[in-house]
Image: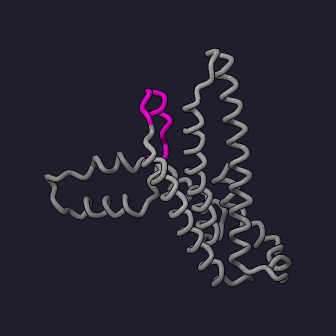
Amino acid sequence: FAVISGSALLYKELSKKTVYNILAKPVSRAQFVLGKYLGMYVTVGVMAALMGIGLSIFVLLFEGKADLNMFYAYFFILLELLIVCAAAIFFSSIVVTPMLSGLFTFGIFLAGRSATQMLYFISPENGESLGSVVLQALCWILPRLDMLNIGNDLVYGASISKDHLMWSIVYAVGYSGILLILSTAIFKRREFN
């Protein structure tokens, strides 16, 4: 939902020309982008919370006890959604069509979830080959959504350290903040036709 709604969010405003009415008021472009992001994140967060509540009730009815570790997973899903929503806004501010914006956002989500698997292709025997350098650069640029996906760890009984929790919060807020700053800078320079 975040990919689909986020990719068309700014496009709808531009195509229907409602952005002119909004920006004619004392609303800066940065406030506009941030408002779109917060609205999308709250909507997606409420949907995720409702699904989490439904899953928790199902587990409670099925197993007869509540698993409190699931709430850690829900929190990490919300952290992951911070980045996915920011990526959707970022690509929506760059790309003209919602299809391309959605594809790029989904690609970032998929690549971010697969970042650890990319590291397997970097072998020390190859040295500093071009492919190894490109993969290392991608691992630094792409969001490390795989580090925020702790569902499997919790299913198998692994505990999540407080350091992992703290750094995950800092990482998600920082990465999404950088994407929003870039989105705002791009949207400020965008010409409306």
Q: Is residue 139 left or right of residue 94?
A: left
Q: Residue at x 59, y 69 (%)?
A: 180
Q: In the image, is residue 130 above or below residue 69?
A: below
Tally the numbered discs: 0
Measured as percent of width and height from the top left, residue 63 is found at: 61, 16
Q: Quadrant of residue 38?
A: bottom right
Q: Quadrant of the C terminus?
A: bottom right
Residue 40 x %, y %: 71, 57
Q: Residue furthest front?
A: 162
- Give residue 161's quadrant in the image: top left
Comparing 33 with 12, the one in front is 33
Name the residue: 64% across, 66% down: 92
Q: Is residue 80 left or right of residue 56?
A: left
Look at the picture and state if 59 lies above or below 96.
above
- Is 125 included in the stretch rendered in magenta? no
Q: Is residue 152 above or below residue 132?
A: above
Residue drawn at 69 percent across, 69 percent down: 34
Does the magenta segment cover residue 157?
yes
- Using the image as rendered, state which of residue 91 and residue 46 is in the foreground: 46
Q: Which residues are magenta?
A: 146-159
Residue 2 image point, x, y percent: 65, 52
